[in-house]
Amino acid sequence: MQQELLNNTIESYLYVAGIILLALLIKRLVSKYLAKLLYKLVAKAAKNIARQSFLDLVVQPLDMFLLLLISIISLDKLNAPDQFHIKIYHISFGQILDSVAAGTLIIVFIWLCLRVIDFVALILEERANLTVDQNDNQLIIFFKDFFKVILVIIGILMVLRFSFNKNIGNLLTGLSIVGAAIALATRESMENLIASFIIFFDKPFVTGDLVKVNNFTGHIERIGLRSTRIRTTDKTYITVPNKQMVDTIIDNISLRVQRKAELRLELGLSATSQQLKLLIPAIKTILQKPEIENSSAYLMDTGKNAHIVAVDYFTTMQQSLEEFNLLREAVNLEIIELLEKSGIELAAANTDIIIKSNQ
């Protein structure tokens, strides 16, 4: 057992192998136990979230983290063989292994933290679902992505510090200068990021709203760090930069209190003033329906081609689009029937061509 092999005794190898094997056998039990303890800390806040959901998120990265940590600590007790005392670009092979081990451990730890952020987002979404305001849900998604980006940046800095032995202080100073240059080069992306904060705090629209922007009409499905995703009424999926959503005039159809219907009747010049005086009150009578909240009908204009009668009416937004279209159809048919009974023709209804001869 005391015989040396590659600068280490067989007993040392067996000791390290036993610890790693034991870690492989009990890592799942230990990670589940630690995950359950962590779950108890947040159980009151996450009482409606199944414990299994939390375990599914946390156990796997916790498994990997514990196994790597125990393996690295165990292997550190062994002496590096003489064959490993080589240098690659003035860096020893042992230093390379240490850097890889430290970097891997940091990456797995960041992975674990990302999963914890996902679970915290689940808790907040559970509470947000209890409120009517859907903006809370989108705000949670936004900040979840934001903190994940920050965590990944921290992870990269830790890898540079512990794997590559870089001075983070000097690095941050250099990054501030480089960051300023990058900010200028990626000005549009920075503008989109700032615009995303403006959208969340100014709230011109929220997830689920029906909006019209740049001749596209659709429902807001997601507001991201850079862009807003819209499912159009044509069932296509478009992405609009947040800066454009802030700078462009947006019609938030969901905030309308009424639906408006417009009808412009171009009546033939053969219609007399007496016919028009009788027609307009009759149209107002047609518009006296329970679904119509307010309406108007008046002689809008007249000229050498037609008399124009404007008909406008409004209905509640609680009415579905299908019901609104059926109402418009019914009103239009009644007005057509009224014109037929009144003997009033629409402009250009008479297509007879009269040829006059000078002879």
Image (cartoon, helix red, strand yellow):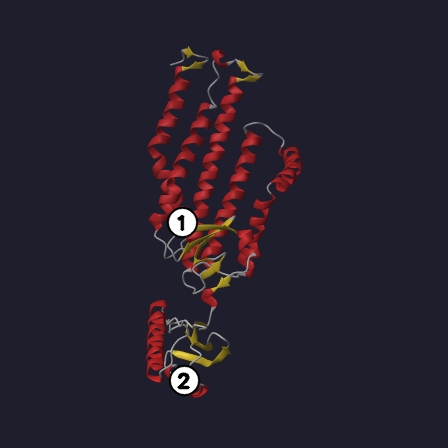
Mark 1: secondary structure: helix
Q: What residue lies at 43% left-to-right and 75% top-to-bottom?
A: 266
Determine whether, in the image, residue 158 is placed left or right of residue 341. Answer: right
Q: Is residue 350 above or below residue 284?
A: above
Q: Residues within 10 Å of mark 2 (few under 14, many from 20)?
A: many
Q: Residue 86, how many percent across, how many down? A: 52, 13
Q: Is residue 15 visible?
A: yes
Q: Is residue 191 above or below residue 301?
A: above
Q: Residue 279, how many percent across, how many down? A: 40, 84
Q: Quadrant of residue 202?
A: bottom right
Report the residue marked by disc 2. Answer: 279
Q: Is residue 107 above or below residue 146?
A: above
Determine whether, in the image, residue 159 is placed left or right of residue 297. Answer: right
Report the residue marked by disc 1. Answer: 39
Q: Are marks 2 and 1 in contact (CB under 8 Å)?
A: no
Q: What residue lies at 59% left-to-right and 49% top-to-bottom?
A: 191
Spatial CA distance of label 2 from label 1 is 74 Å
Amino acid at the residue labelled 1: Tyr
